[in-house]
Image (cartoon, grey):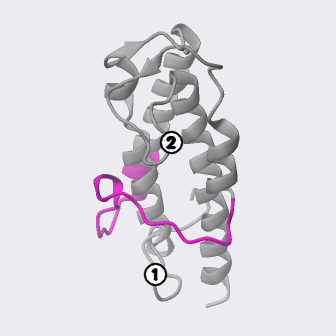
Amino acid sequence: MSPLSEEALNQVPFAGSWTAAQLGDHLAKAYDIMPILTGETKPANRPIDENIEGIKALFLDFSIKMESPKEILPDDGPFEKAELLGRLTTQTQLLISYAQHNDLTPICLAFELPKTGPLTRYEWLSFLAIHTQRHIHQLKNIIQHLGNS
């Protein structure tokens, strides 16, 4: 998102698409998982990465269109570029610090991904990385369309 002007960041690239800024807002909302990570847990009774391949298979299949849960749907905007990038930077730094200083093996009980069940802290952080990969792919498509419009 950094190379885009604030105007381009808030421009709809094609019908039915989010803007690049809305994509960023969606990610910022998705990154807000500290209540899940720090909420109630139980010891893992399975490999701590058991669900990652299934999450990858689903989220990295770019041929399917996914619907966002309403809790993390982006606002309409427009968005200020500096504020949005600041939110994303702050949240990623917080998550990195959490990952470096906490036990990632417990299963989080505060929230479950539909069809997946409860995830370990490691799986939640991996999910965010995979989810981000999906949206980087979308962002590249948005930027390409903006460049061709």
Question: How far apart are the alpha carbons under marks 1 and 2?
Answer: 32 Å
Q: Residue at x 65, y 37 (%)?
A: 52
Which amino acid lies under the numbered mark 2 shown in the image of this protein? Thr
Left or right of residue 119, residue 28 in this image: left
Asked if the stretch drawn in magenta spans residue 95, the answer is no
Q: Position of residue 131 (x, y in %)?
A: 57, 49
Badge 1: few (under 14), some or many (20 or more) residues near its Cα, within 10 Å? some
Q: Is residue 136 above or below residue 12?
A: above
Label 1: state its secondary structure: loop
Q: Which range is magenta?
A: 61-86
Whichever of callouts 1 and 2 sits on the residue coming sooner in the sequence is: 1
Q: Nearer the viewer, residue 123 or 125?
A: 123
Q: Is residue 4 above or below residue 34?
A: below
Q: Residue at x 63, y 55 (%)?
A: 58
Q: Which residue is mark 2?
A: 116
Q: Which residue is mark 1?
A: 12
- For the N terminus, the quadrant is bottom right
- For the C terminus, the quadrant is bottom right
Q: Is residue 132 above or below residue 143?
A: above
Q: Position of residue 32 (x, y in %)?
A: 37, 37
Which amino acid lies under the numbered mark 1 shown in the image of this protein? Val
Label 2: state its secondary structure: loop
Q: Position of residue 139 (x, y in %)?
A: 60, 65
Q: Is residue 142 above or below residue 121?
A: below
Q: Residue at x 61, y 40 (%)?
A: 129
Q: Determine which of the numbered discs, if any, sits on residue 45 in the image.
A: none
